[in-house]
Image (spheres, rainbow, N blue to C red):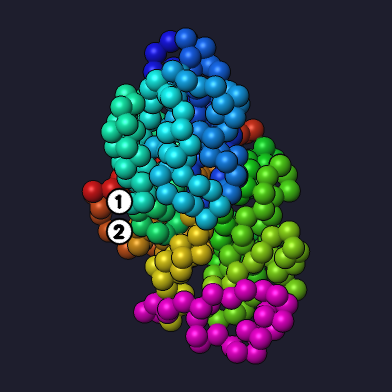
Amino acid sequence: MNDEHYIRQALTLARRGLGKASPNPMVGAVIVRNGEIIGRGYHRRCGGNHAEIEAIHDAGEDINGATLYVTLEPCCHHGKKTPPCLDTLLKHELGRVVIGTPDPNPQVSGRSIEVLRERGIPTEVGVLSDECRRLNEVYFKYIRTRTPFITLKFAQTLDGKIATFTGDSRWISSEPSLKFAHRLRSHHDAVLVGVGTVLKDDPELTVRLTRGRNPLRIVVDSSLRVPLGSRILKAQEAARTIVATTLKADSERHINLTQMGIETLTVDRDSDGKVDINDMLKKLGEMNISSVLVEGGAAISTSLVSQGLWDRLVVIIAPKILGEGMDSIGNLRIKAIENALKLHFVKTYRSGEDLIIEATPERP
């Protein structure tokens, strides 16, 4: 077996941490001696043991002469809840270390690799590096910018409508796609909608159709129009809600929300007097929110697209045609085809009778 084989094994383990490890990265590790895997581990949850420690425990501590394969460079700093993995590794007589990709965290960023080599431990870096970076695209974006990774998700008809001309939108997609949407929620730290979506659909925005954690719920509401009886404001013990608003919001409404135990986040206003999306994302990042799933409505999605503030697009396309109706993305003021926003299709697949497309923007 070659190095790529064992890093693939570690990647498979790492994916088990999806939706649980955040805001930490997903990491997998395997320990191999004489061509046999003697230890496996992955980062199960934020605050728990890191993958390398789990693998050592699984191997029974006897790893002298073995090779450690790990998808991300081991940490060399004290976290809020865990000690440096590097210190533990150096207590054992490892024969070799193979790392998928360096950690972009400034507190690590090649330091562990350097120390391992200085201690005379042969250390290879960059095996399946693209796959290892792609696995943690959320973490890499967050650690470098301190703003969350933004996924836009919406269900539309084949002719690009998210609702009829009367506003009816339930349900455009199939039942398997609804389950997919709930699973997608569980993979993100937060799910976000504009107050227009709350007024029209009264969504709960929790994970009900599949297993997984409930994300933080965020309502963008510059004037605090959210009805106090909305479902998104209920069951705070199961899923917190934050209302992002501005200083122009009604103070009495602010008091009412506070008395209900609803958190508010006051952000700057943009040129139209609405919530400044850039400032909101910056403040969410300061709250250790590393990923946000945006579920609507069209105004929020259009604002994020027009400002280039999104990282991934997930579109569920139903085999239906509505004709006149509400567009999934509003007016971007693009006058010529040559100026259209270009996308890179990452993945396409079926979900029941629907087609799902995942895409990323083509950055200059």
Q: Is residue 243 visible?
A: yes
Near mark 2 (Cα within 10 A), the count class, few <14, some 14-19 or many ≥20, is: few
> Which x, y percent locates residue 171?
67, 49
Question: In which quarter of the view is residue 200 placed?
Answer: bottom right
Going 39% across and 13% down the picture, which residue do you hit? Answer: 2
Q: Read off the residue under disc 2.
A: 334
Instruction: Identify the residue shown where x is 36% and y is 46%.
Output: 108
**Which amino acid type corresponds to the residue marked 2 in the rendered image?**
Ile
In front of the other: 349 or 183: 183
Q: From the viewer's perspective, is residue 128 above or below residue 206?
A: above
Q: Secondary structure at mark 2?
A: loop
Rounded to the nearest whole Å, what is the CA distance between mark 1 and mark 2? 7 Å
Determine the residue positioned at 70% across, 69% down. Answer: 233
Seen in the picture, residue 348 relative to 261 is either above or below; the reply is above
Tell me where residue 174 appears, x and y as whole percent.
66, 40
Asked if residue 253 is positioned above or below residue 80 in the image, the reply reads: below
Q: Is residue 263 magenta?
A: yes
Say whether marks 1 and 2 touch (CB < 8 Å).
yes
Q: Which residue is mark 1?
A: 340
Where residue 177 appears, as percent x and y from the top left, is 63, 40
Residue, x 63% and y 43% (percent of image)?
183
Of labels 1 and 2, earlier in sequence is 2
Q: Residues within 10 Å of mark 1 (few under 14, many from 20)?
A: few
- Is 128 or 351 nearer to us in this picture? 128
Q: Is residue 236 left or right of residue 65?
A: right
Magenta residues, as a range? 245-272
| 252 left or right of 155 in image | right
